[in-house]
Image (cartoon, rainbow, N blue to C red):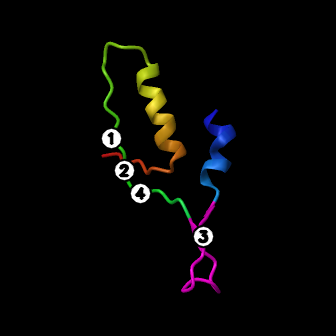
């Protein structure tokens, strides 16, 4: 589902123009914000770890190892 909807989630969102931005192109561009920490229980199914991970990767979060 995340792969199917990724293009729609990333699409620029048009916003209404006012007098000051009449000649400009006004839109909201979604960009990755930073790192995400996913905390999951060790004794629960793997699904509780993978669902937030898929969402974080689809949102464009970076990963840091070290």
Pair 4/2: label in front: 4
Q: Main secondary structure of the magenta part?
A: loop
Disc tally is 4
Is 38 positioned to the left or the right of 14 in the image? left
Of marks 3 and 2, the one in the foreground: 3
Does the CB distance between marks 3 and 1 fall below 8 Å? Answer: no
- Circle 4: element type: loop
Q: Nearer the viewer, mark 3 or mark 4?
A: 3
The residue that label 1 is drawn on is 37
Badge 4: few (under 14), some or many (20 or more) residues near its Cα, within 10 Å? Answer: few
Label 4 to label 1, Cα distance in Å?
Answer: 13 Å
> In this picture, which residue range is highlighted in magenta?
12-28
Residue 51 against residue 2 in the figure, above or below = above
Q: Is residue 66 above or below residue 22?
A: above
Please report the residue visible at 57 percent of the width from the left and 79 percent of the height from the top.
18
Q: Residue at x 64, y 32 (%)?
A: 1
Query: In the image, is residue 37 above or below residue 15?
Result: above
Alpha-carbon span between mark 2 and mark 1: 7 Å
Instruction: Tell me, for residue 33, which label it has, or none.
Output: 4
Query: Disc 3 or 4, which lies upstream in sequence?
Result: 3
Q: Which mark is residue 16?
A: 3
Secondary structure under tag 1 reads: loop
- In three-dimensional space, the C-alpha distance between marks 3 and 4, rounded to whole angstroms, equals 24 Å
- The percent position of residue 12, horizontal first and vertical second, equals 62, 61
Q: Badge 2 is on which residue?
A: 35
Q: CA distance from mark 4 to mark 2?
A: 7 Å
Give the residue at x 57% y 85%.
19
Assign a secondary structure to mark 3.
loop
Q: Nearer the viewer, residue 41 or 11?
A: 11
Q: Position of residue 13 (x, y in %)?
A: 61, 61
Residue at the far front in the pictured view: 19
């Amino acid at each position: 589902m995340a792969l199917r909807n990724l293009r729609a989630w990333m699409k620029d969102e048009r916003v209404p123009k006012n007098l000051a931005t009449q000649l400009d192109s006004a839109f909201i561009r979604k960009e990755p914000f930073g790192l995400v920490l996913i905390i999951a229980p060790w004794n629960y199914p793997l699904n509780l770890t993978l669902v937030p991970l898929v969402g974080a990767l689809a949102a464009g979060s970076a990963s840091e190892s070290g």
